[in-house]
Amino acid sequence: MAIETWDSPYIVIWLCLGVLVTVLTYGMRGYNGKISGISAVVYGLLIMILSALDGAALGQYMYDKTEKYNFLGSIGMTLGLSGPLLISGLILFLFYQNRVVKHSDEIVLRDGNLEISESYLLGEITWLMFLGLLALGIGAGHIVMALVGDREGLLIASTVLIPLIVAIWLITQYRKWMFKYIVWVLRRKGLLQVVDDESRSKDTEYCK
């Protein structure tokens, strides 16, 4: 493994706590609209670096030297890397949802199309979820590869790609699900801003 001396679970715990503190700080500042472009980059890089170190540490901790194929190590590295990224994205999504509820004018349904104001908080969610799902797909492929072992064949080889294909499909879908949920929340609270320019233009022509 990459970091052979990191075989303590306490390192994994401290790294996860570091990610959590960073995400909560970022979320609170993003909720209050106090995030600048530079600080967003710094927070994002810190989350990704801590997640990468966590993947290496958990993979090393779960590594089984007696096994020819590193099955447990692959599981540890996959969970250690993708887990903090995905959980961070979900936590930031909760902050973003609460911000949109507070500032409902940031999402407007205009003529059936969703108009979304630019947000560093939303950008970070998109990036973290993308990286987390991609890491999960690649890591799951390595896990399948460890399970397959020395077996050969087209069918066996294709099973390694299945997790990556599923991850890519999820990447293309999660934003749609996310905004469907936010629109549902806003509509339920009576906060959804709906603008129908076509009806407004027709009313204007009628008045003339």
Image (cartoon, rainbow, N blue to C red):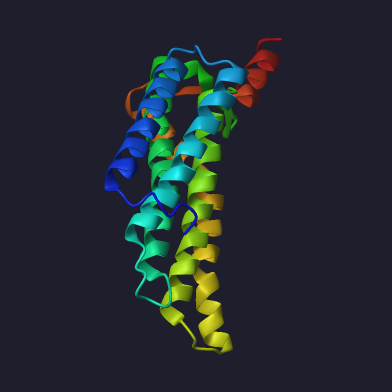
Q: Is residue 195 visible?
A: no
Q: Nearer the viewer, residue 2 or 75?
A: 2
Percent x, y for residue 52? Answer: 48, 45
Residue at image location 45% in from the left, 38% down from the top: 50
Rendered view: 208 above or below 147: above
Q: Is residue 163 visible?
A: yes
Percent x, y for residue 194? Answer: 51, 24
Which quarter of the picture shows residue 152? bottom right
201 relative to 49 in the view: left or right: right
Quarter of the picture containing the C terminus is top right
Percent x, y for residue 45? Answer: 55, 32
Residue at image location 70% in from the left, 16% down from the top: 205
Q: Nearer the viewer, residue 208 or 23?
A: 23
The number of numbered discs placed on residues in the rendered structure image is 0
Percent x, y for residue 159? Answer: 50, 77
Direction front: furthest residue = 5
Residue at image location 50% in from the left, 11% down from the top: 34
Q: Nearer the viewer, residue 41 or 34?
A: 41
92 relative to 131 in the view: left or right: left
